[in-house]
Image: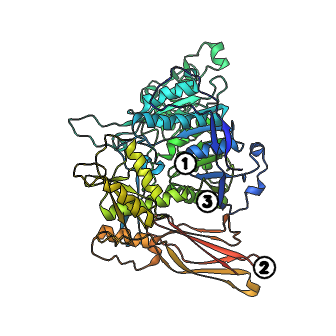
Amino acid sequence: MPDGVKVEIKPAKGRPMLTWVGKRPLRYVTAFPAQHIETFDPASDAAKRHSDIWSDWPAGYPMGGLLFHGDNKEVLVHLLANGFRGKVKLIYIDPPFDSGADYVRKVQLRGAKGVAKLEGESYTLGEQIQYTDIWANDNYLEFMYERLLLCKELLTEEGNILVQMDPRRVHYVKCIMDEIFGEQNFINEIIWNKGREGGSSRSHSPTSSMPTEYQNILLYAKNRQDRYWNPPLGPYKESTLQGIEKDEKGWFYTRGRMGRKPAAWELEQGVALKTYVCEDVNLTKEEVIERLTSSNARFVAIGDIWSSDLVRQSRVADFPTEKPESLLDIIIQSGSRPGDLVLDCFIGSGTTAAVAQKLGRRWIGCDINKGAIQTTAKRLQTIISEQIESPSLPGIAAGKKEKAAAPAQLSFAVYRVNDYDLQIQHNEAVNLACEHIGITRTKSDAFFDGTLGKRLAKIIPFNHPLTPLDLEEVKRELGARPEEERDIVVVCLGKEVAADGWLEDWNRLRKQKDFPNKIEIIELRTDPKYGKFFVYQPAQAKVSIRRIKAKGASLKVEIKDFISPTIIERLKQQEGILTPQIEDWRAMVDSVMIDVAYNGEVFNIALSDVPEKKSDLVKGEYELNAPKGETTVAVKITDMLGEEVLVTQTV
């Protein structure tokens, strides 16, 4: 797809309309191309998919799951521009909504002794997306408004969207969704009672407020008249079970229709207010109750309050916002059929894609955080590998309403939109610089990165030296803040000579003691105080790749050594003056993947070594079938902080 394609977005026409500073409709949005970077297709599945459910699939994508790394606004526009408009049956999103929370991925080294814990990439929304104070109401509302407009365009006429929020934000988002989807398409506000253990991430003192034990899930249809919805079922209430009676035939029934329409024979016999639960006349009431409760059965349409018992808690380690698979099981089975397309554009650790894969749905996921993409990819690799080895493997065990569906796909591809890796690398460098210098990060400022004492701090991207143009940007920003009187410190890695002249002229006019906005430069290579800054060094690996056996039919890949300077530096910062000792390089490695015929663009995974437990280590030595003739073998090693090293060799 060429750069700069304009995608038309229909205006929101619903009522009421919420107003905020900076509100702007999306009429035309620029779509960026996506770079195909990785494929997991161990059974060569993508080429075999020719069933009816794939007949509407855009030709530019392999027939399998799709995982996108990038700003989800840009990903959604890309999907609209490339054939997915009106093809998504179900959208579930759980966007960040807590301005006080730092969603930091906690990681630790592998192995039995790998107890050292590190802080991974930050999941704070403002840091990830670099928006102006995203948590100020106006900007947060615009953030949600734009993405919900795009989501609506992707939904089929039968489609539903579920947005999970908390009580502090849900009323704003409901007004936005009334405007975008129309108040007539509001279906329910579901209350997920998580229980005390799953309460609010904010701390509560006994005198301030009561702990929040629930979250809100807004359910809207694209078109209420045409929507598909298979109401979720739950167990009978205790009061209903105790009210079971026998009729004249000895059949057991309970009063009421329990949320279902009466059958024709019930209407004919005038028993529409009865629900028959068992026709075995030889059972006692107690035995019937035991049968109805002992198998985790689901019989009755549940209401809009989902208890913690109904949604059993099961979380993925290191993801504090992770949702139980059983919650997504209820949502996906209710809002889609096997083979339908499910989308989650805040994929996190991949629960939506994981459950969709187990339930035989097609899926698309995206996230702005590279660590989330890596975690989701590893999770899907494990699930798909199990499905290939055991074709009869059931999906979710949490009270399925439907028979276990065959997987819609046994492969997935990873794409990157607008080369978002560059921004992630900059964020990591900024974090290291702030820790080294002592800068306090500021999440509420779109331009300055934080404060150093009483001064504002600005960090120039480390991929270029400081130039007069960078300083002109600081000047323009100060011009937009006429009441700002603090001095400025600019941090850089290298600087042009012309920058010194610009700075000298600027500060000459501010020699008077009370004149504001003096600018000081900290150049991290030469500054006498901060000159020992840890300059980012990429991880490195020593790998042996060779042909073995008769006629070179097999490949032997052996990782001799691996070093991650970033992990070493993080450990030094955490342990103080002690130098960390890592006895086995495998403690730093999260996963190893091998492509035996790498084309230099897309990494096709022929072997994946992802240890299931943190106490397990990667093998480090591998033997694979070799393609005939000369081939390029690529080995991708990912460390525990998510940094990737790619080693290639032609054999």
Residue on which disc 1 sits? 71
Q: Residues within 10 Å of mark 2 (few under 14, many from 20)?
A: few
Residue appearing at x 50%, y 31% in the figure: 23
User: Can the viewer see residue 319 in this picture?
Assistant: no
First along the sequence among labels 1 and 2: 1
Tell which residue pokes out farthest to the bottom in this image: 550
Q: Secondary structure at mark 3?
A: helix
Question: Disc 2 versus disc 3: distance between alpha carbons?
Answer: 32 Å
The Cα–Cα distance between marks 1 and 3, rounded to whole angstroms, is 31 Å
In the picture of the structure, the residue carrying the numbered disc 3 is: 386
**CB atoms of marks 1 and 3 within 8 Å:** no
Q: Secondary structure at mark 2?
A: loop
Taking the spot 71% from the left edge, 69% from the top edge, the residue there is 599
Mark 2 or mark 3, which has the lower sequence index?
Answer: 3
In the rendered structure, which amino acid carries the disc numbered 3?
Answer: Glu
* Label 1 secondary element: loop
Up-down: is 417 above or below 303? Answer: below
Which label number is shown at residue 629? 2
Tell which tag, 1 or 2, sits nearer the viewer: 1
